[in-house]
Amino acid sequence: MRLWVVARLTLREAMRRKILPAAALLGLAFLLLYGVGLYLSLADTALGRAPVRESPLLRRQILNVLLMMGLYGVNWLTVMMAILTSVDTLAGEISSGTIQAVATKPIRRWEVVLGKWVGFALMLTLYILLMAGGVVLEMYCFSGYVPPGVPRGLGLVWLEGLLLLSVTFLGGAWLTTLATGVLAFGLHVLAFLGGWIEEFGSIAQSRTAVNIGILASLIMPSEALWRRAAFELQGPAVGGFGRTPFSIASVPSTMMVLYAGAYAAIALGLAVRRFGKRDL
Amino acid sequence: MGNAAIQTQGLRKVFGTKVAVEDLTLQVHRGEVFGFLGPNGAGKSTSVKMLLGLVAPTSGFARVLGRPVGDVGIRERLGFLPEHFRFHDWLTAEEFLRLHGQLYGMAPARLSERAGALLELVGLAAHREKRLRDFSKGMLQRIGLAQALLNDPELIFLDEPTSGLDPVGRRLVRDIIREQRSRGATVFLNSHLLSEVEITCDRVAFIRRGEVLAVREVAGIAPGGLEELFIEIVGTDGGL
């Protein structure tokens, strides 16, 4: 199937243009830094001392905060990877004319878009598995701690990546490279701020602030997916000793997760439709 | 109509407020080398793009090899060298041909054989493992030409194929066009180089503002007379 020809081409381009090697190298540097930090924290702080050691709940909470710090970094890296690697793939090839020799072959336009999408989605999947998996594994190796909800949490981060990828594709099928980047990052930052407003509203018991946050999540549900992921990864026992920087006061609902999935599918569908109709 | 490689009726393209192609009505027979002549900005490239399904016509209709434009299946029988041959420049010459052969849906054995033969034909056999980004403009045009011939197409669109080439390259293109005609293929040659058209084409259409002003048999034009004829038909203002 010609879709796979394009998917393979996308992967090969990422290799050749040193996108994958650079991401892998920086990823390893991140994991190394995180691992060293984690090791030193565990060896050298209150964690190693008697009161904490003897209180499993407190210890688990502290370990969870350390874990969430790593995963929060991975989440941001995933957001960047999803947008930056794919921002130029449609818009760039349209504006340079590279797409012309491809689109005049016996391949349907939707196969071009979906082939590229599949290539980037595979890359993102691998990236999340490596990075988030690496953080979880380091935590386990150094402390023996396994957080709750790992498959669910990582699955939600994965969905967030695919959502941003699809939105970037929609931009690319329609706008220039630069405008696509501005659109995708702009929407995510909006979602990010919305998440904070919703959290603040929930703590301050302001219904209006919560609603504004939910509205931002409806405009762009990417951050809601992270917040749900953070909730899953912390589990009900964490937070028993007060709030942590990663506590989620207003947990995005399952409905919101489904909405995000539908949002991604519709964005990709619109990207296919727009690319199918536009002049190249 | 069954014998026409290309048939268009009132093909028109408007970008915003700019009319790129006014009213293109044209018939290209199978097996001929057809020259599409016109000044810069006459709508030649846009016309080619409409015939290839890259650009949707605002109105009018066109058939290519008996099928409406935009038919995906028909593209297995088409070849195209774009005007601004921009390709994935991180691929090597050989990988580039393999990619486009795969997009044509060619079987691996046939593809290897064709890619090898075409690299020889366009004089790039020694550069098969070189990346396209290290190619000169002329080399890119040669590899683009090889790409357009991979599938032994019945109809080949060449958009300004000699513009970046030196005399040796131009001669190569000329020879290839002749060879394609002798094998029975139709060639649609978009060019503003009158001498090239005069040597290679059977018929020429004169275009201005996306309208066919006249179609002539090249055999009926006195040697070297194409330029005169062009100015007579298109005018000295180039239609601007």
Image (cartoon, rainbow, N blue to C red):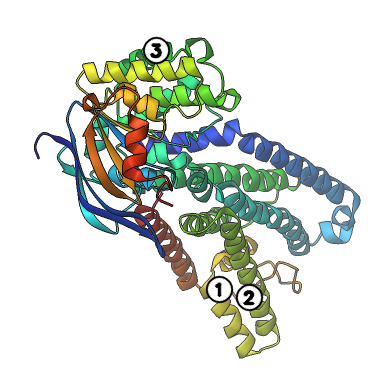
As shown in the figure, which amino acid type bears the numbered disc 1? Answer: Ser
Whether residue B80 is visible, yes or no, is no
**CA separation in Å, label 2 and label 3:** 61 Å
Residue occupying image coordinates x 59% and y 67%:
A187
Chain containing the residue with disc 3: B
Using the image, determine if residue A172 lies above or below residue B185: below
Q: Position of residue A170 (x, y in %)?
A: 47, 58
**Residue in the foreground of this view, choosing between B14 and A163:** B14
- Name the spot of residue B142 as percent of width and height, x first: 45, 22
The residue that appears at 23% across and 44% down in the rendered structure is B71
- 2 and 1 marks in contact (CB < 8 Å): yes
Q: Secondary structure at mark 1?
A: helix
- Considering the numbered disc 3 on the image, is that residue within a helix, a strand or a loop? helix
User: Which labelled disc corresponds to residue B68?
Assistant: none
Please tell me if label 2 and label 3 are on a single chain: no
Res. A217 mark: 1
Q: Are both tags, 2 and 1, on one chain?
A: yes
Q: CA distance from mark 1 to mark 3?
A: 58 Å
Query: Which amino acid type is shown beneath numbered disc 2?
Result: Gly
Q: Amino acid at mark 3?
A: Leu
Please give the residue where the numbered disc 2 appears in the rendered image: A194
Q: Earlier in the sequence, mark 2 or mark 1?
A: 2
